[in-house]
Image: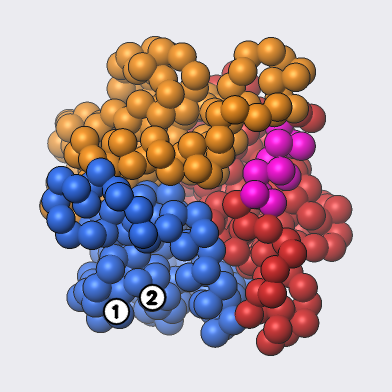
Chain colours: A orange, B red, C blue
């Protein structure tokens, strides 16, 4: 059985980190399924999904790490062509990836105690986002 | 229901980026399924699958970013042991990952307008590649 | 049909790389399923799952690469708040990601010849780990 849900929210952009664990949990509970997977997917080319301990320290550290890995200030070929200044956003999103698959059993996501599912908005401006949660199982 | 398809193509290696969205789309349509997931997987240790806005600017920027993250010129322990000079290829492939899961509904992949599914060939030479697309759903 | 298995082992921490391919293979064989996916997931916020050619050279190179990408020695905001000194572990785990999905057909994982499934323990100390392998298919 398959249930497809959407999570909608606003972000501040610029590596804003949004905890979507409650929404994914609700999608799994709402499906009534016992065991299976929740596939979380970010449509769009400037967002990523991963897990992290969601706390203000790591929010700051992740912004620092993304800037270290793929700095904002550089003459990206993307920016020269399109003028939207978000070349770094695209590369960051591709490196971290748009997709996450989390198994569940007995109706509960199998996450660590300090592990949350987060959306990272890599774009260089506030965005409205609509993330997919597809629950598949039995 | 599960359908397993293969996509075959040649690459130039050296972070060559191949847009495989049409092939994944075709695999989903060909399955006749309404809702589910397409799992795209790169067998082999020097290739990755992710999404990106597929345009020449970001192709260049991704090559730059991969060189920044994991530079080619270094005495990799892998190269010292095996002499094939592609230590950087292996590490890049592991960091970006070989697997991507994309949900679909009503027979259509849920992708952003400017978001394509790409294979990145991290190896240091042209390769023939055979990528798996497994469609699972109802 | 869905089968959920767990893999338990000890690690040395500090980017220790554990080859779990035999365990994932066994979970697939044990399920008796012909085709589908094996979802490998690391509960907890300081571990990652990916694929690599598992050999001592790349084990060293991966430790070097993780230190280059996200260095251990830095005043992480996470460390200032919590004092456990593993801010770099969290960021590394989030960047590489906790989840991997590998398709199988005719009861065999579709992996490259030199491609193994590995768990990377990013934490700064030895850990007991319990990794999930969920097999879903027909």
Q: Residue B77 falls in which quadrant of the image?
A: bottom right
Which chain contains the residue that carries disc 1? Answer: C
Q: Position of residue C1 (x, y in %)?
A: 32, 57
Confirm whether the magenta stretch covers residue B66.
Answer: yes
- Secondary structure state at the residue bearing disc 1: strand
Count of labels in the image: 2
> Which of the labelled discs sits on residue B109, or is there none?
none
Q: For the point 69% across and 51% down, which residue is it?
A: B67
Q: Which residue is mark 1?
A: C11
Q: CA separation, marks 1 and 2?
A: 6 Å
Q: Residue at x 20, y 75 (%)?
A: C128
The quadrant in which the C terminus of chain C is found is bottom left
Which residue is depicted at the point 59% across and 22% down?
Answer: A86
Sort mark 2 into few (<14), some (14-19) or many (20+) by Cα contacts within 10 Å.
many
Pointers 1 and 2 in contact (CB under 8 A)? yes
Q: Which residues are magenta?
A: B58-68
Residue B65 lies in the magenta-colored region: yes
- Residue C67 seen from this side: yes
Residue at the image point whose x is 76% and y is 37% from the top? B60
Crowdedness of circle 1 by 10 Å Cα count: few (<14), some, many (20+)?
some
Q: Position of residue C93 (x, y in %)?
A: 36, 55
Residue nearest the observer in this picture, A128 or B40: A128
Q: In which quadrant of the rendered view does residue C39 lie? A: bottom left
Q: Mark 2 falls on what kind of element? A: strand
User: In the figure, is residue B87 to the left or right of C104?
Assistant: right
Left or right? Give the position of B100 relative to C80. right
């Amino acid at each position: 059985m398959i249930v497809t849900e959407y999570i909608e929210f606003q972000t501040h952009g610029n590596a804003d980190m949004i905890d979507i664990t409650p929404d994914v949990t609700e999608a799994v509970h709402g499906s009534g399924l016992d065991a299976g997977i929740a596939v979380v997917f970010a449509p769009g080319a400037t967002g990523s999904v991963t897990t992290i301990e969601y706390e203000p320290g790591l929010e700051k550290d992740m912004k620092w790490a993304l800037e270290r890995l793929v700095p904002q200030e550089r003459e990206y070929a993307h920016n020269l062509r399109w003028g939207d200044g978000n070349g770094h956003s695209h590369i960051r999103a591709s490196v971290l990836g748009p997709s996450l698959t989390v198994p569940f059993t007995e109706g509960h996501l199998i996450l660590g105690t300090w592990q949350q599912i987060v959306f990272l908005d890599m774009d260089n401006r506030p965005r409205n986002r609509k993330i997919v949660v597809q629950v598949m199982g039995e």
